[in-house]
Image (tube, rainbow, N blue to C red):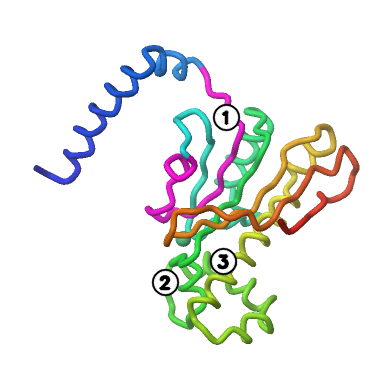
Amino acid sequence: MESYSKLLLQNKAWAAEMKQDDPHFFERLAKDQTPAFLWIGCSDSRVPANEITGTFPGEIFVHRNIANLVVKDDINLLSVLEYAVVHLKVQHVIVCGHYGCGGVKAALTDKSYGILDPWLKNIKNIIAENQEELQNISDVEEQCNRLVELSVKKQVYNLSLTDTLRKVWGEENRPRLHGWVYSLKDGLLKQIHEVQPPLAAKEPGQAADV
Ligand code: CO
C-alpha cells in the first residue's frame, strides 16, 4: 500500500469512530466554529496542536510556521490573527515553541539555508539581542533551548504590538496572550510568559513571566 493510502483509510476509520461516539459531531461542526483559542505553533510534525492538548476539531484555530514566529509584515499570520481575534473572538492566543526546534537550531549556525535565510534572520535578531546571556551557556542543547524560550517571549511581545490586538484591546478585555514551550522528550507543555489585556487602557499589555 502507498503510504498516503494509509492516511485515507485511517481517515475513514476516524470519521466512523467520531460519529459513533457523538452522532451529531460533524453535523454540529459543519454549521459553525467557535474556538476559544488561537494557536501559533511550529510546523514541526511532532508538535500538533490538537493532539498534545487533548482537544477536538473546532476547539483551536491554528497557524503554524517554521519556529512559530510572529513577523510584523507576515500577511498570512496577520490575516489569521485578525480573523481569529476580531471575527471568531478567541479568548486566548497561544504562541507555542518547542525545545529542540530545528529552525532555532539552524539560526544558531552560520550555515546558509537558501530561501529560509530571511525567515531565520528573525531568530538571528533575537540571538543578537540576547548575545551575552546565550554566550554564557556552554552546552549547545541548553543554549538552543534557552533561545527557544527567549524567542517565544519575543513573539508574544510582537503579537502585542499588532494593529489587531491594539484595536481589540482598546475595546475589550480579551484576548490574553500566552507563551508556552513544549518538550519533545516528555510531551509536556510549560507556561513561560503571559500578557493580560490592558483593560481598555491605550497602553501595551501587562507582561508577566509565569
Ligand atoms: Co520547530
Q: Residue at x 41, y 56 (%)?
A: 44
- For the residues marked 2 and 3, what is the alpha-carbon distance in whole angstroms? 22 Å
The spot of residue 94 in percent (x, y) is 61, 46
What residue would you read off at disc 1? Answer: 35
Quarter of the image where the C terminus is located? bottom right
Instruction: Look at the numbered disc 3 and give the secondary structure of its residue.
Output: helix
The spot of residue 197 in percent (x, y) is 80, 42
- Of the two numbered discs 2 and 3 in the rendering, the one whose residue sits closer to the viewer: 3
- For the residues marked 2 and 1, what is the alpha-carbon distance in whole angstroms? 37 Å
What segment carries the magenta color? 32-53
- Of the two numbered discs 2 and 1 in the rendering, the one whose residue sits closer to the viewer: 1
Residue 78 appears left or right of 24: right
Residue 148, numbered circle = 3
Say which label, 2 or 3, has the lower sequence index. Answer: 2
Type of amino acid under label 2: Gly
Residue 114, numbered circle = 2
Say which label, 1 or 3, has the lower sequence index. Answer: 1
Marks 1 and 3 close (CB-CB < 8 Å): no
Rendered position, 93 above or below 183: above
* 189 part of magenta stretch: no
Tell me if the residue at label 3 has its CB under 8 Å from ligand 1. Answer: no
Quarter location, residue 133: bottom right
Instruction: Look at the numbered disc 1 and give the secondary structure of its residue.
Output: loop
The spot of residue 198 in percent (x, y) is 85, 44
Instruction: Look at the numbered disc 2 and give the secondary structure of its residue.
Output: helix
For disc 2, the neighbor class at 10 Å (few under 14, some 14 to 19, many from 20) is few
Rendered position, 44 above or below 132: above
Residue 28 appears left or right of 151: left
Q: Residue at x 81, y 32 (%)?
A: 172
